[in-house]
Image (cartoon, rainbow, N blue to C red):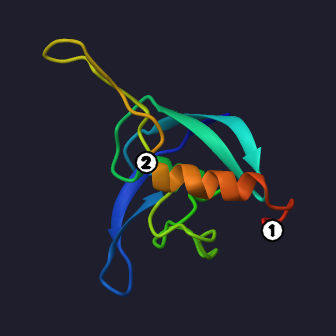
Amino acid sequence: MTVDQPLRKMRDPSGQHRVIVADDGRPALTQFRVLQRLGGYSLVEAVLETGRTHQVRVHAAHLGQPIAGDELYNRRPAPEGLDRLFLHAHYLRLPWPEDCIFHAPLPPDLNRVADGLATAGPAGEG
């Protein structure tokens, strides 16, 4: 699934900076692909065609599928054992000034959470 929605920074009533989907925002394009279903969650791959602040987080929330553990854009409580965003760059390519490619496996803490979700029921109950 491709999300092609412009993003704009704003300040919410509490004074916190947020990013929102807005027609007057800067172009932002993210491609999402579900890799695995994990209880009431999905492990997805997100490919960014642009690099806007909070792009993956805002586009995922815009789809109604916010990032687990995201206290800014997700109102659902985090899954058991998750104390941060369930967001990880497993592949990063920086094409300038020369082509640099980095690979990183899912960190142990996120692996533990994913394993727990995979053995939980459909709604994330274990």
For the N terminus, the image quarter is top right
Residue sitting nearer the eye, 39 or 66: 39
Residue on which disc 2 sits: 55
The x and y percentages for residue 47 are 50, 31
Q: Residues within 10 Å of mark 2 (few under 14, many from 20)?
A: many
Determine which quarter of the picture holds residue 100. top left
**Outermost right residue:** 122
Secondary structure found at label 2: helix
Mark 1 vs mark 2: in front: 1
Residue on which disc 1 sits: 126
Secondary structure found at label 1: loop
Q: Which mark is residue 49?
A: none
Task: Indicate the amino acid at tag 1.
Answer: Gly
Left or right for 33, reference 92: right
Task: Indicate the amino acid at tag 2.
Answer: Gln
91 lies above or below 67: above
